[in-house]
Image: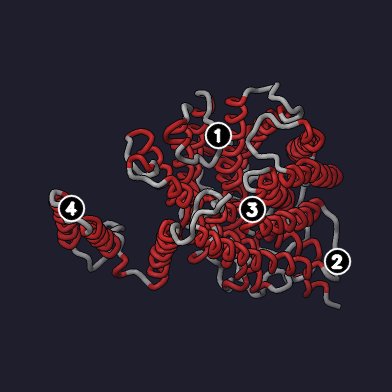
Amino acid sequence: MNRPDDYLNADYSVSSWLLTTDHKRIAILYLLSITLFFFVGGAAAVLFRLELMTPPGDLVGPETYNKLFTMHGVVMVFLFLIPSIPAVLGNFLLPMMIGARDLAFPKLNLLSWYLFILGSAVATTAILMGGLDTGWTFYTPYSTMFAHTNVVTGVLGVFIVGFSSILTGLNFIVTTHKMRAPGLTWFRLPLFVWALYATSLIQVLATPVLGITLLLLVAERGLGIGIFDPAIGGDPLLFQHLFWFYSHPAVYIMILPGMGVVSEIITCFSRKRIFGYPFIAFSSLAIAALGFLVWGHHMFVSGQSAYAGMVFSILSFLVAIPSAIKVFNWTATLYRGSISWQTPMLYALGFIGLFTLGGMTGLVLATLAVDIHVHDTYFVVAHFHYIMVGGMVMAYLGGIHFWWPKMTGKLYSEWWGRVSAAVIFIGFNLTFFPQFVLGYLGMPRRYHAYPDEFQVLNVLSTAGASILGAGYLLPFVYLLLSLKYGRDAGRNPWQATGLEWRTPSPPPTENFARVPEVREEAYAYGAEEAP
Amino acid sequence: MTTPHVRKGTPPKVYVSVYAVLLALTGLTVAAARFDLGRFNLAIALAIAGTKALAVIVYFMHARSAGRLIWLFAGAGFFWLAILITLSLYDPLTRGWLPPPEW
């Protein structure tokens, strides 16, 4: 039974939720919001995967198909993936992990959620008005000169959501600098905090460029100001430069917090100190920094100069180094660990495998000559889904399962948890691995019809998507059921280290009755295991 | 009364003076736009805008009295802006270096 003074029971009124400044309640508001958008974006994917069951365009026409994949991309990227781990798990955990009672700017945190809701409402309005068909990348000159859909409304929605992201990043940076508990030095911080910090830097430094770029798009489309259209003095590639200056680092906004989650889970369920703490910490910062230097690899065949292509190709290879450092260190942490196969661990291990495959195929795409062959094919679609879904969504679900007992005070069904992790892993691979082959064989992305020889692989992919969809519904059901039927979790059901586990489950409104003092490094699992 | 946003030691007249300078520079921008100075049009417009931005950062955003960490973050913003401009320009400036491929 929940303690009477926990954050969930502090007040039951609607206004107490809508006007809350408690970081934990705001995290729950984000959780509910992005879960809704996850299923909206997923519904669009179901429709176009059904369309791709057969070679001819028989379920939806080309215009509807274009709107469906645009809706899927915009909703999943801007309304689910980017806010997912930072805004839900980060909001909930960051203050507790550093021994603080809230974020540095609690009201700004609430404003951030309202901006997210406002922006997503505007984007949803664009969808309800008939949608837009530009793809989530809004490429000019199509978006400025030719598209007759609701481009401006959709773009303004994304523009507003960007401010939510900036405010969250700003809040996390200041909180990490200023509100750490006594004794909690930088090298005693949980690696999830390092990952959130690196993510926040990207959010603050890159998101404004997206906002400016989208405004310039609206200025050209609405006012005829020449920015991207060569006929009135613009450069169409300028849009791609500006867009990817944000959107490539945005990939790291999505994946870096997932890496932080995996570091927490791997250590806990192998009962070992993390291997190479400073390397993992600094590799997060290195990924954040290098991630800003590689955007041109999205433009190898766009007309970008060959010399710029070479520079961006080399720089893109460099990002593999800090990413590989993380994978090697997680693997080394597992070595001779006392591993237990709990649900969060299964998700984390799934992350490592799928992220590695996604990352390695990224190197294939960063190779100039090979990219000419596979550019804009399903190979690219498979690659970034291995990173964003296989990596990020696995990490997000792993994190949700890991900290669910802390968030709700309840334990879920471990058996169903393991089943869901396995079903999602199998469904994911069946959905997206055939797409690597499709792309290599030459099937372009974003077409609603295709030649007959591609049907078998497309049917496999759609079959996998149905398994994946069922896999995603499972946690939705058993986590909700755990709220009513789950056993009480207690303060620390995983016997994990970290300040958040010292609070009751669910935690009280201000987390700690007394601000804790930190006297040891993170992940002191080895100490308790030592003979 | 001192508001939380007005640091001690920064008299209101400083803000008023900076505001007046910003207005004057805006007027200068408009005036400069009336003359065609050729290749200097852009340079002058950017110089005025840069001066205004600097005045806002130093006085209105209190960077003058801020610690090193704040300067570090402010500097990082400009460093990242330099990355954006440099690597973006690298593309158009090198487009003609190689002949187009013959397919």
Q: Amino acid at mark 1?
A: Ser
Q: Which residue is labeled 3 in the image?
A: A371
Q: CA distance from mark 3 to mark 2?
A: 42 Å
| Residues at marks 3 and 4 on the same chain | no
Whichever of callouts 3 and 2 sits on the residue coming sooner in the sequence is 2
The secondary structure type at the circle numbered 1 is loop
Residue at mark 3 to residue at mark 1: CA–CA distance: 55 Å
Which residue is at the far front?
Answer: B102
Q: What residue do we see at 57% from left, 29% from top?
A: A67
The CA span between labels 4 and 2 is 68 Å
Q: State how far apart marks 2 and 1 are (Cα).
A: 45 Å
Q: CA distance from mark 1 to mark 4?
A: 54 Å
Along the polypeptide, which appears first: circle 3 or circle 1? Answer: 1
Give the numbered dot on residue A13: 1
Of circles 3 and 4, the one toward us is: 3
Measured in 3D between alpha carbons, the distance from the residue under mark 3 to the one under mark 4, in whole angstroms, is: 46 Å
The image's mark for residue B29 is 4
Residue type pointed to by label 4: Thr
**A364 or A266, which is in the foreground?**
A364
Q: Chain of mark 3?
A: A
**Looking at the image, is A85 positioned above or below residue A514?**
above
Using the image, name the chain to which the residue with label 1 belongs. A
For mark 4, name the chain.
Answer: B
